[in-house]
Image: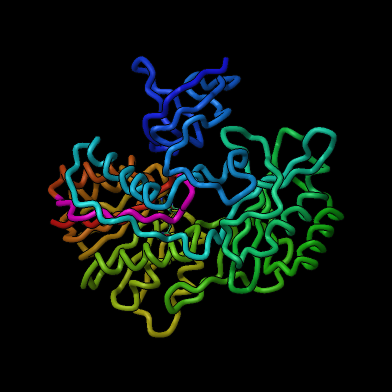
Amino acid sequence: MVERVRIDHVGHRGDGVCVDAGEAIYVPYTLGGETVEVDHVAGHHPDRRKLLAVEVASPERVEPFCPHFGVCGGCAIQHWAAEPYRAWKRNIVVETLAQAGIACEVAPLVDAHGAGRRRITLHGRFGTHDILKVGFAAASSHDVIPIHRCPILDPALEGALDAAWALAEPLTSKMPVTKPLDIQVTATANGLDIDVRGSGPLPTQLITALSRVAEQHRLARLTRHGELVLQRLPPTVTMGRAEVTLPPGSFLQATVAGEEELAALVTEHIGKAREIADLFCGVGPFALRLAEKARVTAYDSDAGAIAALAKAARTPGLKPIKAEPRDLFRRPLVPPELRDFDAVVFDPPRQGAQAQALKLAASKVPVVIAVSCNAATFARDARLLIDGGYRLEIVVPVDQFRHTAHVELVARFTR
Ligand SMILES: C[S@@+](CC[C@H](N)C(=O)[O-])C[C@H]1O[C@@H](n2cnc3c(N)ncnc32)[C@H](O)[C@@H]1O
């Protein structure tokens, strides 16, 4: 059913929100103040509408720069001028903290798009009529939108799409259409590092075909579910003074600028601490920089990431880094262990670090730095620290995922 609605504002997920008789209706790709023609969306989204036409456009509307915008699910916002977009993104953090009853200074948004995304996950599958599609998932569906070019990628990912198409060709022809292939591509100092998932067991001739594609595309490394298919050169990234060889599939910040900005904020806000715990450390982008001045003990549940960090920690000139695998959801550091540190940084996945925040709240660590990619779970964990007696001094929002509703932040707590 086609309707005309007026958009009130852009919500925290990037969709325009229309409040109709007390009920919120969400319309992607619209802006506050716009009058738009919309249609219902088939299936299970009674509160979502599809944009058909913008009848009265916002003065803040701009022309999207990518031909796939509006279909590809990779970007939610390319149609909004930079300044109101930046104000909206900072406001996601401001409003989320206010809703949780947390009063705190929120700094201006730090832009961390830099040269663009250095890591992407593409999907590949055969569509109808046996036509191969490789690209990003469509907005709100599992369809694959075929793409050959993406303007938000770091130039270091040059060739990533061609390589993904070439790898998907032999693999998807053997797979059921319902199950797309995931192709994670990371730009490294020695070329592209690709991990392919979802193909299941493969016959030897198919593995040989994949390693031929890896050679042809001059990949640094090709793995399947983390298992080596071919390595021409070690896939390394530089973190501070150290060179880290990436384990397949481990976490890595999405842009170089994002990693550098987050690490610089962590280093600045941690101050003069000499004994630091880096919790949820990944391959060590914070630990390896903090160790230029302080001793660091680092924990993560990903054993591959910990091994990579332990190796990089041997870089000459760094203070000692102790890196240990540990599940911090099940076995958070407890107050007697936390006594060893004069600062703690924690950077959990999206679900936050509730168990660890509870233990930190009961500790006497004078400085705690939180890094988060989810303002809502950060607010929940911050509440635990504040109720335990910490003061939240400042929150700095960081825009690593430009054109999306994701926002990162760095926060400083003291007691
Ligand atoms: C947002 S990443 C941050 C990694 C690192 N600080 C960085 O900036 O690259 C979150 C990290 O938490 C780790 N992780 C996820 N669940 C965990 C758990 N239960 N215990 C410990 N680490 C966990 C992941 O392996 C990942 O390295």
Q: For residue 199, say whether it is visible.
A: no
Residue 89, percent across and down? 37, 47
Residue closest to the eye, 40 or 203: 40
Please state, as top left, top right, bottom left or bottom right, where the N terminus lies in the image: top right
Q: Is residue 149 above or below residue 264?
A: above
Residue 44 in the figure: left or right of residue 110? right
Q: Is residue 397 magenta?
A: yes
Q: Quadrant of ligand 1?
A: bottom left
| Residue depicted at 63% across the width and 58% down the height | 185
Residue 300 in the figure: left or right of residue 226? left
Please state, as top left, top right, bottom left or bottom right, where the C terminus lies in the image: bottom left
Residue 389 in the figure: left or right of residue 96? left
Instruction: Kindly report the secondary structure that dominates the magenta region of the rendered protein.
Output: strand
Q: Quadrant of residue 375?
A: top left
Residue 6, percent across and down? 42, 25
Give the farthest residue toward the right.
205
The range drawn in magenta is: 390-404
| Residue depicted at 42% across the width and 42% down the height | 59
Residue 144, percent across and down? 68, 40
Q: Quadrant of residue 99?
A: top left
Q: For residue 348, say whether it is visible.
A: yes
Q: Quadrant of residue 136?
A: top right
Residue closest to the eye, 40 or 138: 40
Which color scheme is applied?
rainbow
| Residue depicted at 51% across the width and 42% down the height | 76
Q: Is residue 63 magenta?
A: no
Q: How many marks?
A: 0
